[in-house]
Amino acid sequence: MAFPRIALNRPAFPELREWVPACNNARQIHSGAWIMALPRQTIALLKSARQLAVETSADAILLLTETNLDWNEVRTALEGCRLLVAAQDEELASRIKREPGLTVLDSHPGPLPVRDRLSMALLEAVAAEQLRFGAHVVALYNGIEVEDRPDQIDSMSLIHLDEHLERLSARELRRLHTKVPLETLKAVVDLATEIGREGREGKPIGTMFVVGDHRKVLARSRPIGFDPVRGYSRKERNLRDRWVRESVKEIAKLDGAIIVNKDGTIEAAARFIEVKTEGVNLGKGLGARHWTAAAISKVTNAIAVTVSESTGVVRIFQDGEIVLHIEPMAPRPVVWRQFQLEAADPDGSPFNFQEGQRLASTK
């Protein structure tokens, strides 16, 4: 599902302003530092966002920012609208929280692609009960990404959360064309979401399960060290048993993958998977665990399930691609359907936005 996006072209040489107290375009903030006034283009975009929010009865305006802004001007331009702010990092978020009347989300994804940062901010807003599941949101963000340089907002999208967010159910797993029985797949996914939500002993855990086609998977892996499931009976290693799943949460703290037979029996744990990632394309922001999961699912008939240590997000891989993105929210996990951001040609027809493409300017 792609969102239409409105974007502003940046001039080659943006207007410069003096960073001095006497300048009318600067103001002093709580820390004693001076902050620049918003460019005219940004103010115009904020006012357009307000108009769109009013006309569509949007629940909120979500603003992703990579730098501090003149929040007095932001509030003035968005007067009467509910504003949620997501900062790129924790330090920036702490500075913005000093501003009165702003709702700042506790989502600090760091230097990820804008699509991923927008997804994380929306999910954090739902988890924090700042947005309902079927909310309509006007999103403002920096869509023209320039490395090593924070920029102010230049793009706007209207997002309908009911098109991208729903409670996880067995129906989602049934849609996967695999020889792995639903009962086994559900046991692994339930365990992964519990690990993603709870971690272990209060600490986050990242891990990977590879389910099905276990002989080929074992042939493409090697033990990292001692195998913690070696010597146990098949019954004592079967993930369909709730008590076994609880024990595996401790094993998940170890490095390496957990290899699971299609009947739910753990065949091996703490395995290093040796597979090339050629032909796999996951984009930016995902680490070696996710690339390995995609690669092993591409060269075998296995399903790979990963838990992100940094976010707790559970991803399911099949045929080298992410087929499900699960947020381990309490009390019940939800499926997040990714989206593509689009810009518009001058004639109004949309085209897919990719880094480096020129965007149509708004009048």
Image (cartoon, rainbow, N blue to C red):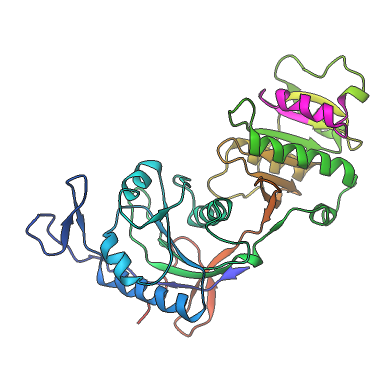
For residue 208, which quarter of the picture? top right
The vertical placement of 250 against 355, above or below, is: above
User: Would residue 99 appear left or right of 347 to someone viewing this image?
Assistant: left
User: Would residue 36 appear left or right of 153 to someone viewing this image?
Assistant: left
Percent from the top left, x then y, of residue 214? 85, 33
Image quarter hosting the C terminus? bottom left
For residue 65, which quarter of the picture? bottom left
For residue 141, which quarter of the picture? bottom left
Q: As drawn, which residue projects farthest toward the left?
A: 22
Image quarter hosting the N terminus? bottom right
The vertical placement of 148 against 50, above or below, is: above
Instruction: Give whichever of 305, 329 is nearer the camera.
Output: 329
Q: Look at 72% across and 27% down and name the residue there.
A: 249
Instruction: Give whichever of 230, 358 is nearer the camera.
Output: 230
First to last magenta residue range = 237-258
The vertical placement of 160 against 29, above or below, is: below
Does residue 320 show up? yes
User: Magenta segment: does it hold 298?
Assistant: no
Q: As drawn, which residue projects farthest toward the bottom?
A: 347
Instruction: Give whichever of 269, 49 is nearer the camera.
Output: 49
User: Magenta segment: does it hold 244?
Assistant: yes
User: Would residue 358 appear left or right of 2 to someone viewing this image?
Assistant: left
Does residue 180 show up? no
Q: Look at 36% across and 63% down and name the residue there.
A: 153
Q: Look at 48% across and 56% down and name the residue there.
A: 114
Percent from the top left, x then y, of residue 123? 57, 54
Percent from the top left, x then y, of residue 183? 89, 43
Q: Look at 35% across and 41% down and name the residue there.
A: 91
Percent from the top left, x then y, of residue 117? 50, 53
